[in-house]
């Protein structure tokens, strides 16, 4: 597995997982509980991991998220 994205934003994390699932790209979230163990929720970012074979398709989701953040794309499309 390779790292696709890191974030502490639970909404973005959930959205990315849903988009990847909609594209049939299996993904796992690493470090989900590590920040709670450390006592600081923001200390350790959660990592979205995908299979290397799915990386190019998964990177389109990252691009989509960046476009939404810049206001260039409607998040409901």
Image (cartoon, rainbow, N blue to C red):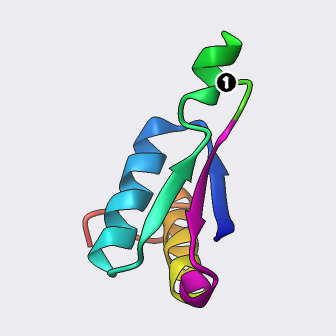
Seen from the viewer's position, the closer of residues 40 and 64 is 40
Q: Nearer the viewer, residue 4 or 64?
A: 4
Picture residue at 46% right of the left edge, 37% below the top: 10
Q: Which residue is mark 1?
A: 42
Note whether 44 is above or below 18 in the view shown.
above
Which segment did they paint magenta? 45-55
Q: Which residue corresponds to the image point at 62% horizontal and 39% vertical from the top-left?
A: 31
Front residue of this view, candidates 19 and 33: 33
Left or right? Give the position of 2 relative to 55.
Answer: right
Compared to 74, does 24 lie above or below?
Answer: below
The magenta stretch spans residue 33? no
On screen, 45 above or below 47?
above
Q: Left of 32 or right of it: where is 2?
A: right
Q: Residue at x 54, y 36 (%)?
A: 32
Residue 45 point in image, percent of width and height: 67, 38
Which residue: 41% across, 41% down?
11
Rendered position, 73 above or below 9? below
* Residue 73 coordinates in the image, percent (x, y): 42, 71
């Amino acid at each position: 597995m390779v790292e696709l994205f890191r974030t502490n934003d639970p909404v973005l994390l959930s959205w990315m997982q849903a988009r990847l699932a909609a594209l049939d790209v299996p993904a796992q979230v690493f470090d989900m509980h590590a920040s709670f163990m450390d006592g600081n929720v923001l200390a350790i970012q959660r990592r979205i991991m995908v299979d290397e074979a799915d990386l190019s398709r998964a990177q389109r989701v990252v691009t989509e998220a960046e476009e939404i953040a810049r206001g260039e794309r409607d998040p409901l499309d």
